[in-house]
């Protein structure tokens, strides 16, 4: 098989590797946010996350050393993506005050199904009946985690649901912008909006960090946030959203590990069962994607 035929498959594999690196960064970010949120206002945590991310990103990439970075072909879409990213962050950090990391992420993992629903009309990546079945099974998995009306996670789960909706829209718009704007441009605008909106709020909610560790974690949130979203943007440049989205499930491994090591949280059997259903249905979506595209970029034997 020619190198040209192998190129689409190689690009998808690069995109998958970048996606795994991005979600690993997000797992660390979530753990830091949950820890800081136990003794700080959520808006302070969000504000510091965006302030540190913006400053760190500006150090390496700014309009002075890259004069064309502010140029965007779709300014309204850039604004919408940035708002969705901010909304997802705020809802997610609020959920961490009441939920374990694995509980919040199990609900957030409904994002791939929302992406699959939106990918057809928005991106032209239409979903067949088999994928619709997997989407419905995944939704059942989310209900197992949430257990509405039976004393489960109750209202706090709605925060994670809202974050999932925002994140799905963010992922779709990231894919759309990847065809017109540079990675640096997209990352800059996302951090800029969060910085402009959240930094003025900080004086009203600020409480001095009690230790040097809190200062380190606040800077670390910016580093992992900026780095993770940079990898995410690069991933969407190499592979379709429908291929990448199931690999966000690798974040549950980091969430369970960090949740146990840092907070002593042990996932309940309901969370593990629901997450297992969601992950299985997501992996089925991935397998269908590979079969559909198998004639273009077949997987080599072995």
Image: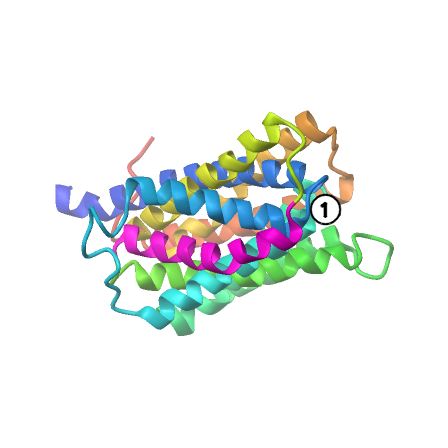
* Residue 40 visible at all: yes
- Whether the magenta-drawn stretch holds residue 148 is answered as no
Q: Main secondary structure of the magenta part?
A: helix
Q: Is residue 183 magenta?
A: yes
Residue 150: image location, x then y, percent: 86, 57
Residue placed most toward the observer, 85 or 256: 85
Dot 1 falls on a residue whose secondary structure is: loop
Q: Is 274 situated left or right of 54 in this image?
A: right
Total labels: the figure holds 1
In-front residue for pair 234/299:
234
Magenta residues, start to end: 182-206
Residue depicted at x 41% and y 47%: 54
The residue located at (36%, 45%) in the rendering is: 230
Given residues 79 and 283, the one toward you in this image is 79
Q: Nearer the viewer, residue 160 or 119?
A: 160
| Side of 221 relative to 235 (left or right) | right
Query: Which residue is at a point 36% across and 52% down the rendered structure image?
Result: 187
Q: Tell me residue 108's x, y (percent).
A: 60, 52
Quadrant containing the C terminus is top left
Where does residue 148 sit, x and y in percent of width and height? 79, 60
Left/right of residue 225 with respect to residue 205 in the rendered view: left
- Seen at 28% across and 45% down, the residue is 61
**Which residue corresponds to mark 1?**
97
């Amino acid at each position: 098989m020619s190198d040209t035929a192998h190129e689409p498959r190689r690009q998808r594999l690069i995109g998958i590797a970048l996606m795994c690196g991005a979600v690993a960064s997000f797992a660390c970010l979530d753990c830091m946010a949950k820890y800081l949120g136990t003794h700080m206002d959520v808006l302070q945590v969000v504000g510091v996350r965006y302030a540190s991310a913006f400053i760190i990103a500006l150090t390496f990439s700014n309009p002075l050393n890259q004069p064309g970075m502010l140029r965007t072909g779709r300014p309204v879409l850039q604004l919408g993506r940035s708002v969705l990213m901010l909304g997802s962050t705020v809802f997610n950090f609020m959920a961490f005050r009441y939920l374990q990391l694995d509980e919040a992420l199990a609900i957030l993992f409904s994002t791939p199904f929302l992406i699959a629903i939106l990918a057809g009309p928005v991106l032209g990546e239409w979903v067949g009946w088999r994928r619709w079945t997997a989407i419905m099974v995944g939704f059942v998995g989310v209900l197992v985690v949430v257990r509405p009306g039976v004393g489960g996670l109750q209202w706090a789960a709605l925060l994670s649901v809202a974050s999932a909706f925002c994140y799905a829209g963010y992922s779709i718009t990231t894919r759309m912008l990847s065809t017109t704007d540079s990675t640096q441009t997209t990352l800059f605008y996302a951090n800029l909006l969060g910085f402009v909106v959240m930094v003025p709020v900080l004086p009203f909610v600020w409480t001095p960090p009690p230790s040097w560790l809190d200062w380190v974690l606040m800077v670390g949130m910016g580093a992992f946030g900026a780095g993770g979203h940079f990898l995410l943007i690069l991933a969407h440049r190499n592979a379709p959203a429908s291929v990448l989205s199931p690999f966000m499930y690798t974040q549950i491994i980091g969430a369970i590990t960090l949740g146990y090591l840092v907070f002593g949280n042990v996932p309940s059997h309901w969370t593990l069962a629901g997450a297992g259903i969601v992950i299985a249905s997501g992996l089925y979506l991935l397998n269908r994607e590979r079969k559909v595209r198998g004639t273009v970029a077949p997987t080599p034997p072995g």
